[in-house]
Image (cartoon, grey):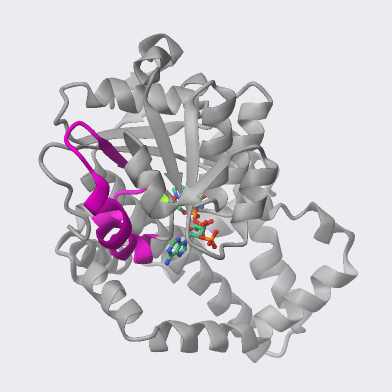
């Protein structure tokens, strides 16, 4: 079992007198900055010139600086900007201002794992990664609760990096829910694998194929959308609450029988797992990361063409029409999107 930490294991006083810069004020950035401030920490937000979030952060009572000034001012720099631009911003606007004894931190290991960011040897490097979207990190904190977090110490220059990381996570409320110890290496690889094979890659392709098979067989696209796309959430909510057994308890025995007979037929486990292992290998040996970094350098041609094609797919058009006509459109909580 991975090691777990709770409030009793975190000493928030470790951060007393330390200045914390939160770089970025998006989903995670606003939550970290506001939670740390409410926990009594000395926080500022670092944003690029012209950012629409300067006003948002200031209205929330936070001090805003340029990224360079924030990095210069801080002892701990938490980098919460898009992973694909973080390395460039780090090199240009953060690295020149790091001094011995500082710490840099991330909420995801990508740039450290694939060596896009290499910190000086006299600087601590840690990860404080909430396992939930930033808006939930904030709303749970305000409700006196927290979102479970992962902690990882990548480089312990000070000899106190673990204590600093745990105190930081306590400051954002994560210790109220539980902190699981991992490495940035494992977090990055399991995160990429999960989103590529099951959560995003796997699921979207599964829904698309199901939709297409029904429509190509002459069924109404609206029916196909309901059965193969809309209902996914209902099933996943049941699994999330009580495991697969609870989901099977709620569905009919006919559905459960079909699950056992047809599941392995559409997704033969030997083929599926061989393909998943190939994806995992690309993640482990850096092939995927290299491809994604190159895609960003080359103007995202492939990425944008796929996004455009998906927007034109019948399942998206029918889905939009149906959601607009249905009362449940208001229940859809976009904050709960996977990450
Ligand atoms: P968002 O997209 O919500 O926010 C991005 C922020 O980065 C914005 O404030 C934006 O600035 C800033 N930014 C973007 N490009 C640049 C640039 N070129 N120069 C300077 N600033 C820039 O990001 P997330 O909060 O989703 O992700 C932040 C980190 O948290 C990532 O490492 C991600 O993997 C991780 N994470 C995210 C989770 C989530 O739920 N979203 C969950 C767990 C981890 P501006 O305000 O000017 O637009
Ligand atoms: Mg993730």
Q: Quadrant of residue 273?
A: bottom left
Residue 44's place in the image compared with 68, above or below, is above
- Which quadrant of the figure contains the N terminus? top left
* Magenta stretch in the rendered image: 83-111
| Position of residue 28 in the picture relative to residue 303 (left or right) | right
- Asked if the stretch drawn in magenta spans residue 106, the answer is yes
- In the rendered image, residue 92, in percent from the top left (x then y), is placed at 28, 62
- Asked if the stretch drawn in magenta spans residue 117, the answer is no
- In the rendered image, residue 91, in percent from the top left (x then y), is placed at 25, 60
Q: Quadrant of residue 264?
A: bottom left
- In the rendered image, residue 260, in percent from the top left (x then y), is placed at 50, 55
| Position of residue 220 in the picture relative to residue 248 (left or right) | right
Closer to the camera in the image, 44 or 3: 44
Name which residue lies at 57% across and 54% down: 257
Quick one: which residue is furthest to the left in this view?
121
Residue 222's place in the image compared with 20, above or below, is below
| Position of residue 295 in the picture relative to residue 277 (left or right) | right
Closer to the camera in the image, 221 or 100: 100
Residue 216 visible to an observer of this rendering? yes
């Amino acid at each position: 079992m991975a090691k777990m930490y709770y409030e009793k294991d975190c000493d928030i006083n470790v951060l007393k007198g330390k200045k914390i810069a939160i770089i970025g004020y998006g989903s995670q950035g606003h939550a970290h900055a506001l939670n740390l401030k409410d926990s009594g920490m000395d926080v500022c937000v670092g944003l690029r010139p012209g950012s629409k979030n300067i006003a948002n952060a200031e209205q929330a009572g936070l001090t805003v600086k340029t990224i360079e000034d924030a990095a210069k001012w801080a002892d701990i720099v938490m980098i919460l900007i898009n992973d694909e631009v973080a390395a460039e911003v780090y090199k240009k606007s953060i690295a020149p201002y790091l001094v011995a004894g500082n710490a840099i931190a991330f909420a995801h290991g990508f740039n450290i794992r694939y060596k896009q960011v290499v910190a000086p040897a006299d600087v601590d490097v840690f990860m404080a990664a909430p396992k939930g979207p930033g808006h939930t990190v904030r709303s749970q904190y305000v409700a006196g609760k927290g979102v479970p977090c992962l902690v990882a110490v990548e480089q312990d220059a000070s000899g106190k990096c673990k204590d600093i990381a745990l105190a930081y996570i306590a400051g954002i409320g994560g210790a109220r829910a539980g902190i699981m110890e991992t490495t940035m290496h494992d977090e990055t690889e399991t995160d990429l694998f999960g989103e590529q094979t099951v959560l995003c890659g796997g699921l979207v392709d599964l829904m698309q194929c199901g939709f297409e098979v029904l429509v190509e067989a002459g069924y109404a696209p609206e029916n196909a959308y309901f059965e193969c796309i809309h209902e996914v959430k209902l099933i996943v909510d049941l699994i999330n609450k009580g495991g697969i057994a609870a989901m099977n308890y709620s569905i009919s025995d006919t559905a459960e029988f079909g699950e056992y007979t047809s599941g392995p037929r559409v997704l033969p486990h030997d083929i599926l797992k061989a393909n998943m292992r190939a994806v995992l290998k690309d993640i482990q040996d850096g092939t995927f990361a290299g491809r994604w970094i190159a895609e960003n350098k080359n103007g995202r041609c492939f990425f944008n063409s796929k996004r455009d094609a998906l927007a034109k797919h019948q399942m998206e058009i029918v889905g939009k029409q149906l959601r607009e006509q249905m009362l449940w459109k208001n229940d859809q909580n976009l904050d709960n999107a996977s990450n």
